[in-house]
């Protein structure tokens, strides 16, 4: 039985995109053009193609300019780095996003770190990671920032709360932990070597699951009344929908966790829609900073 408040990330993200759109309109009046996001897609990965299509649609919905570069999956690292150099130098581009994963001949780290930090709207560049870790102004990775916005909306002040982040990737777990620390949470980062993960999680007021393992975090891992944020997006077989059909599920077992939690994000419709909204927010923030147009408070 579900007793938890279901956190509606879809509705929140739509409000956020609308606010970004308003601010983008005001910025466009100051700088003479809408903020612009360049998206680079290398290869034909179907999941990446869907993400990129959604990103482009939402960018235009928010009144921003979307620039697309679609490259063959045989593209060399040198050619991709050349394109990034061109986009770095192009004053009409405010944000650069290279869709991951990249084909095996290309080193992702080299590509991420070739993007100028001020246009790194994914927030993956080592300079932005360092700025976040040292409490300086940074472009923050979109998925954890989206989680933080949902948590603030749900809980108000996070100060003093016990937060457990399961997962230590550079794109979700580590920046999520940094953001929660900045909010004055007491933060634990758990991972595949953590001993007695269930007990660690069961002490959390805020539990963030970014594991990539379908429904691994069950109700037994949830402290009564805790706020549970499920970052996971897993495609699992759904024979009940017909042969060869799939469904999306999170890293949290929704039914059992929702019976214990105070609030919980669903999958889909929780964290997922926040990621693109935060990407647009980062593009706006990046553009405002580059043109010294004053702070953006979103
Ligand atoms: P990674 O695979 O990079 O990291 C997974 C982390 O989970 C690792 O730190 C790993 O530990 C840890 N882990 C794996 N198995 C266990 C276990 N049995 N017990 C405890 N910890 C474990 O994944 P990402 O961070 O990139 O993504 C995590 C999830 O979030 C995925 O489902 C992904 O699809 C989703 N995602 C969703 C996004 C969105 O927009 N909503 C955006 C990005 C990701 P170790 O380091 O020890 O190996």
Image (spheres, rainbow, N blue to C red):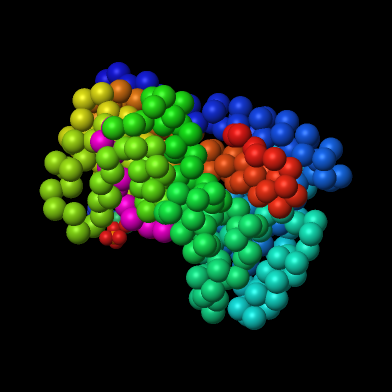
Residue at the spot 45% in from the left edge and 49% down from the top edge: 135
Q: In this view, does 151 lie to the left or right of 18?
A: left
Q: Position of residue 182 (x, y in %)?
A: 40, 42
Q: Residue at the far right: name it.
A: 32
Where is 86 relative to 129, above or below? below
Position of the N terminus by quadrant: top left
Answer above or below: position of 209 versus 99: above
Where residue 185 appears, as percent x and y from the top left, is 31, 37
Give residue 47's quadrant in the image: bottom right
Give the left or right position of residue 154, taking residue 67 as reference: left
User: In the image, is 92 to the left or to the right of 84?
Assistant: right
92 with respect to 168 (left or right): right
The residue lying toward the viewer, choosing from 94 and 111, is 94
Q: Give the magenta part as a residue range.
A: 161-171
Taking the image in four quarters, ligand 1 sits in the one at bottom left
Quarter holding the C terminus is top right
Say which of 70 and 171 sits in front: 171
Residue 170 counted in the magenta span: yes
The residue positioned 68% from the left and 69% from the top of the image is 84
Give me the residue at 49% from left, 39% from top: 146
What residue appears at the point 27 percent right and 40 percent down from the top-left corner?
Answer: 186
From the viewer's perspective, is residue 170 above or below residue 3? below
**Residue 287 x, y percent position in the rendering:** 71, 48
Residue 58 in view in this figure = no
Q: In which quarter of the image is residue 162?
A: top left
| Residue 17 rendering spot, x and y as whole percentages | 64, 34
Relative depth, front residue between 29 and 9: 29
């Amino acid at each position: 039985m579900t007793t938890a408040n279901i956190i509606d990330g879809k509705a929140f993200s739509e409000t956020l995109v609308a606010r970004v759109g308003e601010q983008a309109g005001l910025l466009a009046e100051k700088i003479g053009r809408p903020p612009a996001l360049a998206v680079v897609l290398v290869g034909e990965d179907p999941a990446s193609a869907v993400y990129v299509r959604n990103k482009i649609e939402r960018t235009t919905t928010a009144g921003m300019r979307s620039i697309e570069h679609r490259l063959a999956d045989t593209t060399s690292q040198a050619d991709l780095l050349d394109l990034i150099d061109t986009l770095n130098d192009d004053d009409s581009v405010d944000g650069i996003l290279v869709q991951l994963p990249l084909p095996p001949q290309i080193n992702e780290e080299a590509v991420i770190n070739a993007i100028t930090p001020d246009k790194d709207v994914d927030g993956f560049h080592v300079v932005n990671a360092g700025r976040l870790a040292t409490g300086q102004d940074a472009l923050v990775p979109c998925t954890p920032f989206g989680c933080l916005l949902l948590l603030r909306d749900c809980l108000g002040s996070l100060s003093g709360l016990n937060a457990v982040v399961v997962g230590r990737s550079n794109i979700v777990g580590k920046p999520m932990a940094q953001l929660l620390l900045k909010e004055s949470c007491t933060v634990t980062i758990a991972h595949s070597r953590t001993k007695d993960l269930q007990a660690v999680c069961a002490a959390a007021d805020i539990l963030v699951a970014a594991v990539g393992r379908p429904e691994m975090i069950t109700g037994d891992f949830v402290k009564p009344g805790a706020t549970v944020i499920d970052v996971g997006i897993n495609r699992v077989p759904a024979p009940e929908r017909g042969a060869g059909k799939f469904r999306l599920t999170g890293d949290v077992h929704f039914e059992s966790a929702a019976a214990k939690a105070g609030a919980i994000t669903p999958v889909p419709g929780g964290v997922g829609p926040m990621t693109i909204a935060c990407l647009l927010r980062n593009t706006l923030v990046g553009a405002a900073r580059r043109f010294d147009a004053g702070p953006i408070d979103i």
